[in-house]
């Protein structure tokens, strides 16, 4: 049995609508003219505010390279850590407080009071030893959308068509 032309168009339209997904794009945040107590903070990171997830973290300050990041529930308190493991004792830690939360809209956000760069004294980075600076940094982070390639969508559409009442469908027995 064949579909009528209008039915084919409607089926293609439904297939197209069902195969596309709406998703927010993560934002790449760059440090712009950021310094505190003579230490520059350089680099960038990608952050998806909907998922509260970091990726592509590449930040440096005070001779330390940071490749792991966390954020508070308010999306305003950032922690960058130089290593990732079960025990973070001795790892370098950079903590920054933003004036506004990071969103998936991007923009420019200045820093609030409370910047800190030092070494972790315990396994979960709660205590920082001998901070190299502990004053608010100057500058800002600026965010712009990162193009993310969409996965290829392969969809198979097979219309379910009723067989005429006089035909028996394969695999089904006639009621007796």
Image (spheres, helix red, strand yellow):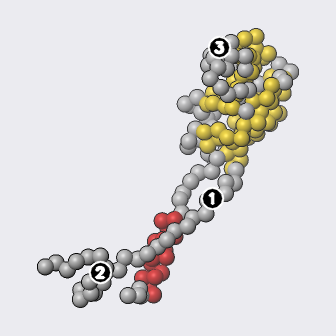
Per the image, the residue denoted by label 1 is 150
Q: Position of residue 53 (x, y in %)?
A: 60, 39
Q: Pick whichever of labels 2 and 1 is earlier in the sequence.
A: 1
Near-viewer residue (176 or 137): 176
**Cα–Cα span, label 3 and label 2:** 69 Å
Q: Does residue 16 appear in the picture of this structure?
A: yes
Q: Nearer the viewer, mark 2 or mark 1?
A: 2
Q: Position of residue 24 (x, y in %)?
A: 59, 51
Q: Is residue 151 above or below residue 26?
A: below
Q: Quadrant of the C terminus?
A: bottom left
Task: Please say if the residues under marks 2 and 1 sit with CB atoms less than 8 Å apart.
Answer: no
Per the image, the residue denoted by label 2 is 169
Task: Please say if the residues under marks 3 and 2 sit with CB atoms less than 8 Å apart.
Answer: no
Q: Position of residue 62 (x, y in %)?
A: 83, 23
Near-viewer residue (126 or 116): 126
Per the image, the residue denoted by label 3 is 122
């Amino acid at each position: 049995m064949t579909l009528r032309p209008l039915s084919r168009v409607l089926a293609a339209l439904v297939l197209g609508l069902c195969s596309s997904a709406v998703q927010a794009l993560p934002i790449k945040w760059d440090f712009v003219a950021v310094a505190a107590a003579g230490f520059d903070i350089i680099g960038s990171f990608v952050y998806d505010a909907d998922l509260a997830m970091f990726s592509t973290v590449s930040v440096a300050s005070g001779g330390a390279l940071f490749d792991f990041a966390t954020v508070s529930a308010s999306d305003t308190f950032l922690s960058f850590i130089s290593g990732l493991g079960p025990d973070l004792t001795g790892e370098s830690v950079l903590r920054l407080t933003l004036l506004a939360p990071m969103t998936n809209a991007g923009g420019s956000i200045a820093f609030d009071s409370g910047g800190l760069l030092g070494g972790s004294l315990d396994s979960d980075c709660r205590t920082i030893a001998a901070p190299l600076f502990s004053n608010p940094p100057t500058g800002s982070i600026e965010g712009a959308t990162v193009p993310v390639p969409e996965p290829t969508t392969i969809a198979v559409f097979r219309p379910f068509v009723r067989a005429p009442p006089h035909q028996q469908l394969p695999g089904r027995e006639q009621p007796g």
